[in-house]
Image (cartoon, rainbow, N blue to C red):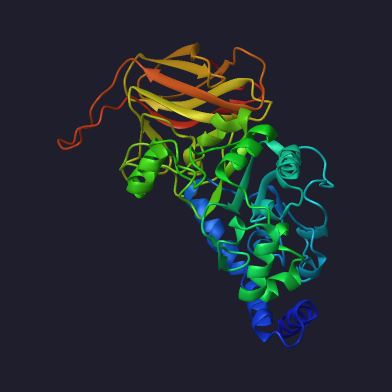
Amino acid sequence: MANKKQSLHDQAREIFGAEDREAITRWVDYWQHSKERNEALLRSFERLSLINFEDKQVLDIGCGTGGLGAIIGDKCRLYVGADYNLHVLKFADSALRRKYLQCSGVALPFADGCFDYIFAFDVIEHVQGGEPLQTEFLKELKRVLRPFGMIFLTTPNLWYPFEGHSRLYFPQYLPRFLADRYIRMGNPGFLKEHNTFAEIQLLTPRVFKRTLRNSGLTFLHDLPCGLDRLEFLKNAPWAGVFAYLGLGWYPHAEFWGILARESAKEFLRKKLRRNWFYEQNQPSARVTDFQPVIDFRRDAYGYQLGEGWYWHETNGAGFRWMRQQSSCYLENRGKGRFIHVKGYSPLPQNRLEVRACLTPEEKSIAIGEHFCKEREEFEVEYLLPALPRPGLVRVELAFDRTFRPEEADDKRELSAMIFEVGLVEKATADN
């Protein structure tokens, strides 16, 4: 670590000159705290959405000295850090599943659709060439993103008066020659690292929305701060009023949010964090990414539950009680042809109806029914009505009969225990 610290100081002296101690100290401190900054940003995004790195391939564009790689490099299948600036990239430490390379953000050397997650923290404003090249940058991110991948992006808002790169107020509102003169007086070290303030291409809300539209990407939330309008109104009432006036993009110092392909938006919005109410629909203790199968005995399924589920009353594991109707979301990875349900009904001749909805736009259709024998487990499978394709399948279960538990203070209406519901490639159960 001492050698790395000394190397950062050496690099800073090359950039700023040995006499500019203030600029050297600021630059070294910035890069030494890269990991802490990335941890804070990652926590912010984890509060917004389900992020699971297990078996994922991750691209960190504009990775700098590799702060994010040090956090998640051992959690995912492969982490790739990329940066155009070799003078900072050379301080990143590679490992077995953590690789770094120098490249341009508008010409990424990767195959189409190879990354599950892409992180682009404060990068797009450094893309030279203005809006056309920034649009190309977003198109490149979309190209290497898997169909249901997510992009976690931050960038400053031009209309916010304090400019973080120069650490001064208002230079972004001045003509180039005046901005450079102003910065030379207030923070001369900036112009030793950057030739001119024109290298910082800040985006206005209008331009940012246009680049997103032209690149085929969209925010998962209504607003660029990682919130929907109602949440914005609740958490920041005055700014929330701006949102309902159509000005919700403007109050932020920085745009940050989760981007996805337009076609994947409805799927990925299921992964956004929600407020969970006691008992009903609570997630498992170990939240994982979306799966083709929900196995309540393993207690690892996360946000895939829709309406109608109750915890097992002792420890929440092993099964979930159903109300008369319940729903869940299963990820079809292109191989699931059958819906499989395993459960137990304490009531005789309790009719189960299974329905499925293959796309968000379609209504659910009935695909099978089963009459449960009293106090016996059942296991059924039904063929999906169409060829499988990647995406979310909404499965709806409904029983004819319900009962109430014997405890006087337990007001729940229950129908059956469910141990497992999922998509399988081949039929195995006896219907």
Pick the residue in front: 393 or 22. Answer: 22
Q: x and y percent of residue 26 in the render?
A: 63, 77
Seen from this angle, which residue lies furthest left? Answer: 408
**Quadrant of image for the N terminus:** bottom right
Above-or-below relation of 162 to 14? above
Above-or-below relation of 346 to 257? above
Q: x and y percent of residue 323 in the render?
A: 33, 26
Q: Is residue 290 left or right of residue 406?
A: right
Pick the residue in front: 11 or 412. Answer: 11
Taking the spot 58% from the left edge, 68% from the top edge, the residue there is 167
Q: x and y percent of residue 228 in the render?
A: 44, 39
Pick the residue in front: 139 or 305. Answer: 139
Q: x and y percent of residue 30 in the render?
A: 63, 73
Q: Is residue 250 left or right of residue 120?
A: left
Taking the spot 44% from the left edge, 36% from the top edge, the residue there is 246
Taking the spot 67% from the left edge, 79% from the top edge, the residue there is 23
Q: Can I make out residue 302 in this image?
A: yes
